Image: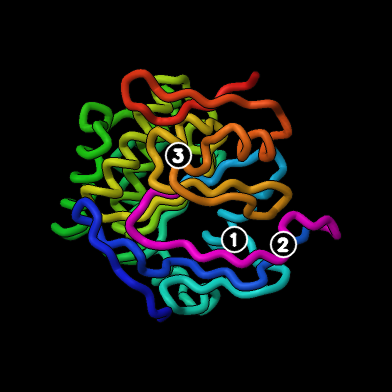
Amino acid sequence: MTDVTRVKTGGRTIGETLFSLKGVSFRVGGIQILPELDLDLETGRMTGIIGPNGSGKSSLVKLLARQQVPSTGSISFLGQPLADYSNRDLARRLAYMPQFTPSAEGMTVAELAELGRFPWHGALGRMDDTDAAKVADAIDRTGLRAFADRLVDSLSGGERQRSWLAMMLAQDAKCLLLDEPTSALDLAHQAEMLKLVSDLTREKELTAIVVLHDINMAARYCDEIIAVKAGQVVARGTPPEIVNAQTLAGLYDLPMGVMAHPATGQPLGYVL
């Protein structure tokens, strides 16, 4: 494993290398989505990935989730080649929510959450007390106890997203990859979802990597922001380091302004 310095922040250990990408590129049908990319991501924080449409954000997260295979280069996860993990071992460490979650036709919230225990007991295994406790905790932590027996597909957009997050929590993985989890949600549910993920990274010492379009939501809830344009990392840092007029203007090719939030002092970006 890469030698790094570990730092305790707010009860969390950060600084251990989670993912290491070396010379990673990705092509689809001869079209280059990601040029050769070198990138290290660390544990113990919530990292937001922002950038314009078509910049390669979702492709990057799919590569990390092993939903796609890089055209060139290598990806390591916790010091081992990502490709070397068995499906079960990887699922015990990493949980992924795609941009468009599939239908959970005929499945209740509790049944969906129980799927998160599959990597631990297998297809022929039975739910034991530990599995049941993990599922119950995930449902409670996502505020879905009153919906546990409801069909997932009958719920509102925000409740469905929390149902999928409950499955990820029941999976007991320490790394959460979420591809635009707020894209179909209204403002209140966006804030609810991101605050929940942010709180979980602290309370459960998780790492979350989240693709977001809203720079202000990223600045509000993320510890670190990575700005991607044309498949390249063009800026990386804390919200105040990234949400500034010059960086945002270069990222989105628009004149941008930034002001301090009147209550929190956090930077807020806006189009001029």
Residue 208 spot, x, y in % from top left: 40, 51
**Where does label 2 land, which residue?**
26
Residue neighbourhood size for the residue with mark 1, other residues' Cα within 10 Å, grouped as few (<14), some (14–19), many (≥20)? some
Three-letter code, disc 1:
Leu
Dot 1 or dot 2, earlier in sequence: 2
**Quadrant of res 33:** bottom right
Dot 3 or dot 2, earlier in sequence: 2
Nearer the viewer's eye, disc 3 or disc 2? 3
Residue 62 spot, x, y in % from top left: 58, 55
Residue 109 spot, x, y in % from top left: 32, 37
**Where does label 3 land, which residue?**
240
Residue neighbourhood size for the residue with mark 3, other residues' Cα within 10 Å, grouped as few (<14), some (14–19), many (≥20)? some
Q: Say which mark, if any, is on residue 139.
A: none
- Point 31% across, 37% down: residue: 196
The outermost residue toward the right is 30
Whether residue 151 is visible, yes or no, is no
Q: Which residues are magenta?
A: 29-47
Q: Say which mark, if any, is on residue 63.
A: 1
Dot 3 or dot 1, earlier in sequence: 1
Asked whether the beta carbons under mark 1 and mark 2 sit within 8 Å of each other, the answer is yes
